[in-house]
Image: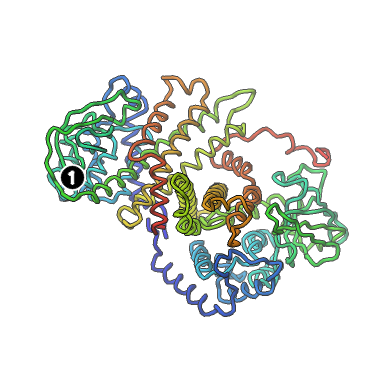
Amino acid sequence: MNFDLDTDQRDIAAGAREFFTGSASPAAARAGLEGGAPAPGRKALADIGFLGITVPEVAGGSGRPLLDLAVVAEQGGAVLAAPSLVTAARAAVLLADVPELAAQLADGTTAFAVLDGSVDGSAPSIDAADATLFLGLDGGDLVVGEGEIVPGRPLDATRGLASVRLTSRRVIASDAAELWARARQVAAVVMAAEDLGGADRAVALGVAYAQEREAFGRRIGSYQAVKHMLVDAWAGVEQLRSLVWWAAWAADSAPAELPLASSAAKACAASTFERAAGTLIQVHGGIGFTWEHDAHLFWRRAKVDRLLLGDEAEHLDAVARLAVAGAL
Amino acid sequence: MDFDDSPDEATYRARVRDLLEQHAGELLHLAPGQEGVDARRHEPEMRRTQRVLAEAGLVGVTWPREYGGRGGTLVQQAIVAQELARARVPGLINHIGIGMCGPTVIAHGSQDQRDRYLARLLRADDVWCQLFSEPASGSDLAALRTTAVRDGEDWVVNGQKVWTTLAHVADFGILLTRTDPERPKHAGLTMFVVDMHAPGVSVRPLRQMGGQADFNEVFFDDVRIPDSERLGEPGEGWRVALTTLMNERVAIGGAGGDIGLPVEALVEHARDRLPALDGDRQVLARQAVGRAVVAALAARYTGYRRLTVLSQGGIPGPEASAGKLAATEAARLVADAGVRLLGDEAVYAATSGGDDRWQRTQAWLPGIAIAGGTDQVLRNILGERVLGLPPEPRSDKTAPFSGGRR
């Protein structure tokens, strides 16, 4: 047994951290709420190769395992990067047998989004607001088409959420329910990885502030009420990291475990990120709930992500059903 | 990353499995539904079981060879633990000795003490206990009041210990005492090996809220301990105790082992019980089961991550406290879901069929959140030593103990 990243994956993480630190930030997420463009944006993500990490090499991708993508997604999540690698990972699964479209995904020439719910009026779907080509499930068939986009007022602009009604459609795979389900599981893992990055950063910012800020004559991190809150948030992040790695590893190395693992990771991500972001605000006190402070941008991401791709209750139910059915 | 055994690990696992089959006739085994064996009633069989396992090379796997161990890895030790559980062999009688006392003797004992004690400990020729907590010093262990006073070549010990697992069957214990009350509390402590059969040692069982007596009170009345049984220098007892405590947190949940009933038992229980619940209750019970499974797997895999780091040469650090904290929380969720699945019978101490596993575990877990470092002490350790947050100001660290609170 070896449950740790290898040297390659550590290098990938370090490279991704450097890229995202220079190209995305909570400040950009704040600007997004007032009409700013997503950062780093699709083109930059394509140029560095992140959109094609799991796209097969024949289609111009890197053909790497999902764990590599999860490691990158964590770094993107730490700075609230957009668009989401959730879309890249999910579309790569759906387009596995459609190399010409997969190539456009990997090189960024086409802006894809995957629609949740009905293609005749979808649920709010990630990165749909800026997409030009949509993938959806239409009566068991996987379809691709153009659509009419209806965005809502964003709670978290980095997710690019919008509802879409397809105006054209072409079937690219029939009887695709199983493929669709697997793609959604993979998407949940990548979202959990982005949430891991966001939660980890939120805890780090909270800890840094508690080490500095003084009240009643001493640093607030010395008070157990503050300390224990941060420890619980940190401990949650460590638990989540284990589930994210397990789930990402399972996608390629133990596919039978993926449904259980991805639901476990997504359920854990929802509550862990919410707690970390809430703690970040609370530890900061008054400054923590201002528009200028970054804390609410993590909080916004947490409040939105917990409901996307299935909320905690849906995934806990799935975990219980799968476990009872013999997955554990 | 690979969750499966490496070829070496697979070979080792096969050998362990073979050995357990070969010796099956000489080992205790748990009956279906039974989770543990009471040392009060089955001491000879438990000692025999450990001796057989020790002779087969399955006890003290990570200990150095010169002290009777195998010089193996933590992963090998985890494999042995998994295979013992799979073969339904109950926990070893000397688990305190193997997990805590032995490593302390290895780290701080004299060569003579190591030679005399360690091999016998592994074979359960001697059973060991750990004599730390006192009625007035639990979390604040360094406030302990049991005294040891030098008298010629001996020390004379007086005082009381409490929460001592296995004291009633133990042959030896490691005993933390105050030898210099004029020094600050942490600086006046000294550790000894005490013969539990020595005159003046008396042991009384301590009954817990669940009705069972896993622990004891131990009284010391003018007990003489030769100076040669000191562990470490006089006044160094706190440093010696930290070795023990760190090993304790690794032993309790630190390496991914389940506390309480394993999550697999909950899943099996849910398979039996869920269909009998009506609509809404079934939905809520599935939420509870799902939450418990997620927490248990997260704790288990976080332990595996720690085990990986340790097996690549890392040393057990304060992170082990996070393992105990997470495993305790997971155990509570597992037990609570298990109780809820009983439906109306959840309000009794056992089902009409006599199954009391879930209620018993439920009554046992509040103690686990306290024993071996309370949840709150663990959070302080993690906050200060892992996150680097400042400690609370303290007034008790520098003043002489005798001038402190009494």
Is A186 rendered above or below residue B5? Answer: above
Residue A319 position, x and y percent, is 40, 50
Q: Nearer the viewer, residue A207 or B300?
A: B300
What is the chain letter for disc 1? A
Q: Is residue B400 left or right of residue A324?
A: right
Q: Secondary structure at mark 1?
A: strand
Is A173 rendered above or below residue A76? Answer: below
Residue B149 position, x and y percent, is 85, 54
Q: Tell me the colour scheme of the image.
A: rainbow
**Which residue is at 41% across, 69% downward?**
B10
Q: Is residue A154 left or right of residue B215?
A: left
Residue B124: quadrant of the picture = bottom right
Q: Nearer the viewer, residue A268 or B4?
A: A268
Q: Quadrant of the C terminus of chain B?
A: top right
Residue B310 position, x and y percent, is 50, 56
Which residue is labeled 1 in the image?
A142
User: In this figure, what is the number of numbered marks?
Assistant: 1
Q: Tell me if I can see residue B319 in this picture.
A: no
Residue A248 position, x and y percent, is 34, 50
Tell me the crowding category of disc 1: few under 14, some 14 to 19, or many 20 or more residues within 10 angstroms, Cα based: many
Q: Tell me if I can see residue B287 in this picture.
A: yes
Which amino acid, mark 1? Leu
Q: Quadrant of the N terminus of chain B?
A: bottom left
**Which residue is at 56% across, 54% downward?**
B253
Q: Nearer the viewer, residue B25 or A234?
A: B25
